[in-house]
Amino acid sequence: MTRIALSSFCLSHVTSHTSHASTLVTGGTGFLGRKLVERLLAEGRRVTVLARRSDTELEKHGVHFIRASLDNAAAVTAACAGIETVFHTAAKVGVWGRYDEFFRTNVLGTRAILDGCRAHGVRRLVYTSTPSVVYNGRDLAGADESLPLTTSCPSPYPLTKAIAEREVLAANSGSLRTVALRPHLIWGVGDPHLVPRVLDRARAGRLRIVGEGNNRVDMVHIDNAVDAHLLAEQAISQSNPLGYFLPAAGRAYFITNGEPVALWVWINDLLVALGERPVTKKISLSAATAIGAVCETLWRVLPVATEPPMTRFIAAELAKDHWFDLAAARRDLGYVPHVTMAAGTAELIAHYRRDPAR
């Protein structure tokens, strides 16, 4: 069985009404983007991927690749020709870096996508945003989409994603319907970032519980995140002969598993299940914030390309509640998380036990 083959479960609970539409997936070689491409292929869709490098396995299954980065406005705009739905999953991610680099990719790249959609008559744009666009430095417990977009954050990623999301939703019209999804902490087998980073830091003895360690956090399994993207496309694809309002068009939605976990309990349970020592050492939020501020200052003046070991944004993310109300996504998109935290965690543990290096 190849990586493209999908279980009947994956195919049964989300079936697109646009099975013959041509789609463009930006960032189609990333974790979310690739899983989305695989699902689209399984539905018989014609798929174009815009990414900085191609993927021979996906090419064998008929994916057309356009090798370009988001800061190549001409290539991005041209990639939209002949496309009916754009899934814009690509972004510059991270908690540290130069603001202008994040702006060039996340804002200017998204503007190029919007220009391409308008120029070539693309009907639908599903934009992958992030819950951090509503960062306010406080606990987010049961937060919903009424929260304002952030304009003040110690990390350029949320700031630039907030600008891009605002412009995507403002672009919604009768000819181009747009929707933004905010998946929180996408994880699962194949995740190259979240769980591997936790494991690496824990094994190196560099992981600390920030704060009291009882904060609750939402996550979303990769299969659920893909479901949400296809459901969002369906929600803005409905025929509208009488001109009635489509609830999802021009709106943003939080996407999670709907099962907030005690973050540090979940991390320690995972570590123990994989034969690692649990994290017991703690650092207060105030101390972590102060260390983060010092690190940020040093990293601005030192010639280093790595991320600082701590930033003010990381400190807040590790210590505070971050869980969200799914009522809007359930109502407007028909979103139901099918892979539970328990099932996804068991699958992940089994995967790492079979292959500890991945």
Image: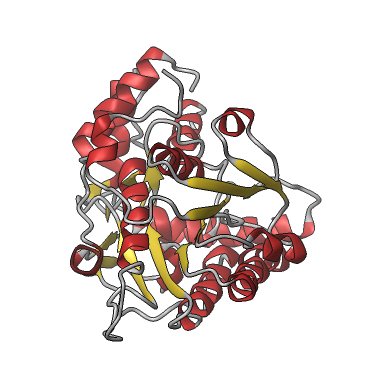
Q: Identify the residue shown where x is 59% and y is 76%.
A: 118
Colour scheme shown: secondary structure
* The one of 73 and 283 positioned closer to us in this rendering: 73
Residue at the far bottom in the pictured view: 243
Residue 135 in sight from this viewpoint: no
User: Please, is residue 297 above or below residue 269 in the view?
Assistant: below
Q: Nearer the viewer, residue 122 or 268?
A: 122
Toward the right, the furthest residue is 303
Whether residue 116 is visible here, answered yes or no, is yes
Q: Residue at 61%, 33% (x, y): give it.
A: 59
Q: Quadrant of the N terminus?
A: top left
* Image x and y of residue 332, in percent: 23, 69
Question: From the viewer's perspective, is 297 left or right of 277?
Answer: right
* Side (left or right) of 33 relative to 270: right
Q: Position of residue 30 (x, y in %)?
A: 55, 42
Q: How many marks do you count on the picture?
A: 0
111 in relation to 89, above or below: below
* Residue drawn at 45 percent across, 46 percent down: 45
Q: Residue at x 20, y 53 (%)?
A: 336
Question: Does residue 58 appear to the left or right of 341 in the view shown?
Answer: right
Measuring from the top left, give residue 138's x and y in whole percent.
35, 70
Viewer-side residue, 230 vs 344: 230
140 sits left or right of 165 in the view? left
- Which image quarter: residue 350? top left
The front one of 133 and 35 is: 35
**Where residue 318 appears, x then y in whole percent?**
39, 52
Image quarter of residue 13: top left
